Image (spheres, grey):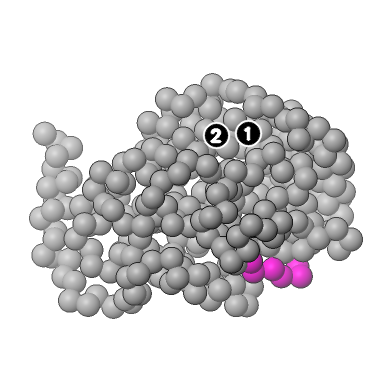
Amino acid sequence: MRSGKFSAWGVLILALSQSLLVSNAGAQQSRQAPAYDKAQARTVLDRSVFYLPLFGAVYREKFTALIPRHPTVRGLVIHNHGCGGMWGWETTVAQFYYREGFAVITPEFVARDGNKLGCPGGSTEEMLKQASERAREGVYTAVNPARLDARGDDIAEVIRWFKTFSDLPIILSGHSEGCRTTYHWDRADPQIVGGVCHKQSVNRQYEHLWKWDTRLPMWSSIEDEDSWAGGSKQYPAVGFTDKFKAHPENLTEFRYHGNSHDPLVRQGESQSLATWLNQRVTKPLQKVQSGFNYEDVLPAVQDAISKQLR
């Protein structure tokens, strides 16, 4: 999903599609597609962008070489895009995370061979309309559990790879469909310390997708009238409070009475998330080099690159 205001026509279309889905969402069955083949998870690192504190976006070899040698990295955030694939918001969110001291990996799920967007289109209104049509078709849409299972396979492969050279704590993050990807995650791993859900709900037609272990903390942002989250003035978007009834202390919700679908744009939103992140990891934030000299570790980066020629 993309950002921006929504026309009355787009909101009406989304509302109509949701009403059609409500009656059968609980019975939604996984609908497979070749793009969801688990074997395609092997290409996830080729479909990912990597970020580091102090450096910003980096290539994979630099990321791998510097993680064990970078003194200010506090953990890893795996951030998942929305139904439109990776756009500018993934970079914006990644910048927030790495400025808070986290390494970041942003996989692009829709680049799997044969895959499609959950909301194609050349405007917000068109994307809303196409998202509704994809939901009715039931294959290339987040309402399909098979899609989120496949996104989970990508995450699992990123985690497997990361754990071969680092034991830093891991946080799963996602915007919109990426948020649904996060709360669909049910693959226990002691290195995962929490989840972040940017601007999404768990309204009735997506109820069957919720698998998050509420013993793990989650930070959530949500706007009452966000059409992409099924919200309106009359029926605000449904947050995660009911899901955390057994562990209310583990949910931090930033709720705003608005209709922007954009992550980290409201006053106080970034600070709320930064505070939550500080509670998840023990290493304090360092926004300066603290003696780190890139030239000292440059040979390790050069060696990682030269291995590609051997």
Image vertical order of residue 175 relative to residue 130, above or below: below
Residue 198 appears in view: no
Image vertical order of residue 154 relative to residue 166, above or below: above
Residue 132 in picture, x, y percent from top left: 77, 39
Please tell me whether mark 2 sits on a helix, a strand or a loop: helix
Image vertical order of residue 303 relative to residue 23, above or below: below
Question: Tag on residue 145?
Answer: 1
Q: Do the residues labelled 1 and 2 touch (CB within 8 Å)?
A: yes
Q: How crowded is mark 2: few (under 14 residues within 10 Å), some or many (20 or more)?
A: many
Q: Residue furthest front?
A: 246
- Residue 121 placement, left or right of 68: right
Image quadrant in which the C terminus is located:
top left
Q: What residue type is labelled 1?
A: Pro
Residue 104 in picture, x, y percent from top left: 39, 56
Query: Label 2, on which residue?
Result: 149
Residue range in magenta is 253-261
What residue is rendered at 69% in x and 27% in y?
Answer: 29
What residue is rendered at 52% in x and 33% in y?
Answer: 150
Residue 252 in picture, x, y percent from top left: 60, 67
- Residue 305 placement, left or right of 150: left
What residue is rendered at 59% in x and 33% in y?
Answer: 147
Q: In which quarter of the image is residue 193?
A: bottom left
Residue 206 appears in view: yes
- Asked if residue 102 is among those painted magenta in the image, a careful observer would answer no
